[in-house]
Image (spheres, rainbow, N blue to C red):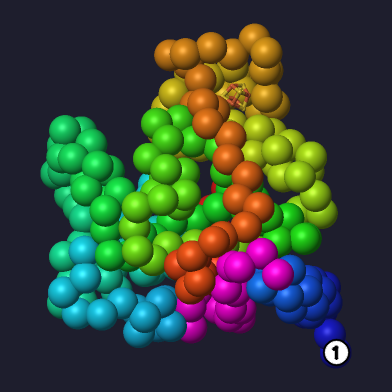
Amino acid sequence: MMTKTDYKKSCHRLQAESIIKSFKKRGIEGVYYESSAEAVEAVCRLIPDGSLVGLGGSETVMETGLIDALRRMDIRLLDRYKEGVSKEEVDEMRRQGLSADVYICSSNAVTADGKLVNIDGTGNRVAAMIYGPKKVIVIAGMNKVVPDLDAAIARVKNTAAPANSLRVNVETPCSKTGFCQDPHCHPPHRICCQLVVTEANMAPGRVLVVLVNEDLGY
Ligand code: SF4
């Protein structure tokens, strides 16, 4: 007998099919996997030996197990998650990531019509998504899918940002209430500084979105 989870997963499959068609019209490639394990295997196969690989800060990428898989590869990984890495080293890796062969990150939200919606604090991730790295691989759980742009921004500000604030221990206004308090939110206690909507991609094959039928990240 089908369970509630089975019905949800079936629904996600249908959504992914439709979103991948929308991506195609926008010049974005899309693939779908049922599990993180399958996605990790596929992503690793795409990265040639010797590649310089940059990472955007991402709970999703951590949760999939991709970081450990990348560490076992014969690549030059800009490993911001390595134990003992300093803030200065992370800053340098962010800069190097802008000219990486492959850049791996997640997206804060994916709309039903195939837009990627992201809000950054420092902006290194959205910068790399826009221009620089030769190839960008975006991994997103189906929990990141939303109906439209308004829902995407609401998701980022009322789901992702409060949880991320608590995770990295930044005293944003939303870390106190769980909801966005904009316009009463300013630096230094603000992590939403650049809002980027990727509506299309001009370089064929540059951006690949890997949708995974799991609940990943925030
Ligand atoms: S704008 Fe400020 S309060 Fe709103 S989600 Fe971002 S960090 Fe939180």
Q: Quadrant of residue 17?
A: bottom right
Q: Residue at x 66, y 64 (%)?
A: 26
How many numbered tags mark residues here?
1
Q: Residue at x 78, y 74 (%)?
A: 18
Q: Amino acid at mark 1?
A: Met
The answer to whether 181 appears left or right of 2 in the picture is left
Q: Position of residue 132 (x, y in %)?
A: 35, 52
The magenta stretch spans residue 30: yes
**Ligand 1's quadrant:** top right
Residue in front for this viewpoint, 27 or 101: 27
The answer to whether 57 appears left or right of 117 in the picture is left
Q: Quadrant of residue 110?
A: bottom right
Q: From where the camera sits, is residue 63 visible?
A: no
Q: Position of residue 162 (x, y in %)?
A: 59, 31
In the rendered image, the quadrant that contains the N terminus is bottom right
Q: Which residues are magenta?
A: 25-39
User: Vertical placement of 89 versus 199: above or below?
Assistant: above
SS at badge 1? loop
Please give the residue where the numbered disc 1 appears in the rendered image.
Answer: 1
